[in-house]
Image: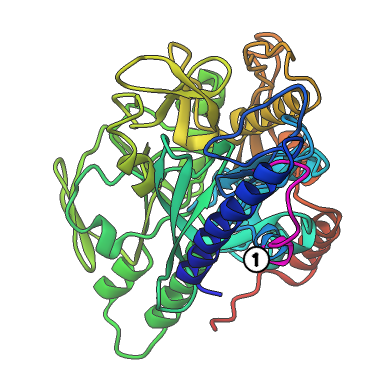
Amino acid sequence: MSWKSRQNVVQTIRASTKASLRILNNNNHNTKTIKFGSYQHHQREQRSVISGLTISQNTTTTNSKAISRIYNDPLLRPALPTSPFSMRGVASLGKTQGNLVILGFKLFKDLSTDNYSLIVVSPRNYFVFTPLLASTSVGTLEFRCITEPVRKFVPKVDFYQAYADTIDFEKQIVHCTSNLEKKRDKFSLSYDTLVIAVGANSNTFGIPGVGEYALFLKDVSDARKIRQRVIECFEHASQPGVTEETKLGLLHFVVVGGGPTVRLSIYDIAPQILGSFDIGLRDYATKKFTRKGIQIRTNKRVMEIKANHLIIREEGEVPYGMIVWATGLTDNPLTRNIGDRIMKDDTAKRLLTDDKLRIIEKNSGKPITNVYAIGDCATIKDNDLPPTAQVANQKARYLRRVLQGLAIDPQYVVNPFKFHNFGVMAYIGKKEALVDMTKAVSPQAKESGMLAWLLWRSVYLSYTVSIRNRLLIPMYWFLTLLFGRDISRF
């Protein structure tokens, strides 16, 4: 049934039901009447909302079949509650690249469907455990190890594979575009409570050629492209007739950005890599990279990227076989579209929220009480936290408790969000890692080498999406240890 047809059904029901109840009201003054508009609570009666149509308990059964038809269609209603606070609809906008799907999982997996009618909108129909995304790009793990289908793992959620384009905050409607086939059908969803968790895009800083030639690492599709390109470069370099100069260019892999995901050659405008780590651990990583032949090029500015070389302001043209863009974050289309209404920070252009994770309206400076934002797309005003999985995970757990508490008790006291820093970790290759807990525990709480690598693997294995993932990941770790990485290109 098309959206237009559904709207016609709603209009027909509204007209006919209103006429029927006028007759009933004239004949029986005890029959409660209909009210159009927003949900309103009255102590002597409980009303149910169907796409903006409020119907009392003792209405006529003339249109019961049509009303039931609408109730069973989530595109026309967020929920059919039995009390003002027990069944409020929740619409969630899921992330577009790999760093924050775990947020949606933690929030919606554990959120009770007894209290909320859940609707999830996301352009992909699976969760991704982003901390191990780099492992899939080099063949240590297979892609299926870090993904989990939304419908299988959270079966009680109404899921739509689509992009969220913009939000009408007055009418409480999210306008979406389908991500299926080539039709790009548009539809709208009403909400009572909205959670924005759409993530952020990689910041290209307006540098020419980045979008055309660089690879990113935000989703499984990105990891697949990197893996295919690495194998392709090696295969191309082994072809007969390839010059030595061409081979050197093909086998030069460049990473722009010095975050925890590093490989072979690193260019960064910052004075050092891994800037969030303890200085001793940064020096350790730099020495290890140097010994492995990885070139660390800090204080370098990329001016342009072309098909087979990049232009560095300080070095000129540098040939490459593959370039991975791992710099900062910026806003995505949805957060960009609502930027005229919602306050955003000046650097990464993230949505600003209060300390209860509610987005803040630009004109009034006040929070919108039923719209929340978590993950890479948002930050707390006057308390800017790093866009990491740890921060996102804690925000999701906090918001889950808040939503559950408000569903049970409308007078539930919501305390401000508090972040607990448990430290940072990074894998640096060759069974070595960095673990920095100096800010969380004590200045001496840091480790590097194989022991840190074992801790890194143990922690991330325990945080994976499902039991299926926890079985597949160690199995492929063992297979890689036994037979090496898969270098098939397909």
Residue shown at the point (56%, 28%) measured from the top left: 370
- Work out whether 32 lies above or below 486: above
Q: Toward which corner of the image does residue 446 lie, by quadrant?
A: top right
Residue shown at the point (71%, 37%) measured from the top left: 32
Judge from the rendering whether residue 193 lies leftward or rightward of residue 415; answer left or right: left
Q: Is residue 108 magenta?
A: no
Look at the image and tell me whether residue 9 can be seen: yes
364 or 375: nearer the viewer: 364
Type of residue at label 1? Phe
Image coords of residue 384 (percent x, y): 46, 18
Residue extending farthest to the bottom is 240
Residue shown at the point (64%, 14%) measured from the top left: 418
Judge from the rendering whether residue 52 lies leftward or rightward of residue 269; answer left or right: right
41 or 335: nearer the viewer: 41
Q: Quadrant of the N terminus?
A: bottom right
Q: Secondary structure at mark 1?
A: helix
Q: Quadrant of the C terminus?
A: bottom right
Q: Which residue is mark 1?
A: 143
Residue interval drawn in magenta: 55-66
Image coords of residue 449 (percent x, y): 68, 35
Secondary structure that dominates the magenta span: loop
Q: Toward which corner of the image does residue 364 lie, by quadrant?
A: top left
Circle 1 crowding by C-alpha within 10 Å: few under 14, some 14–19, many from 20: some
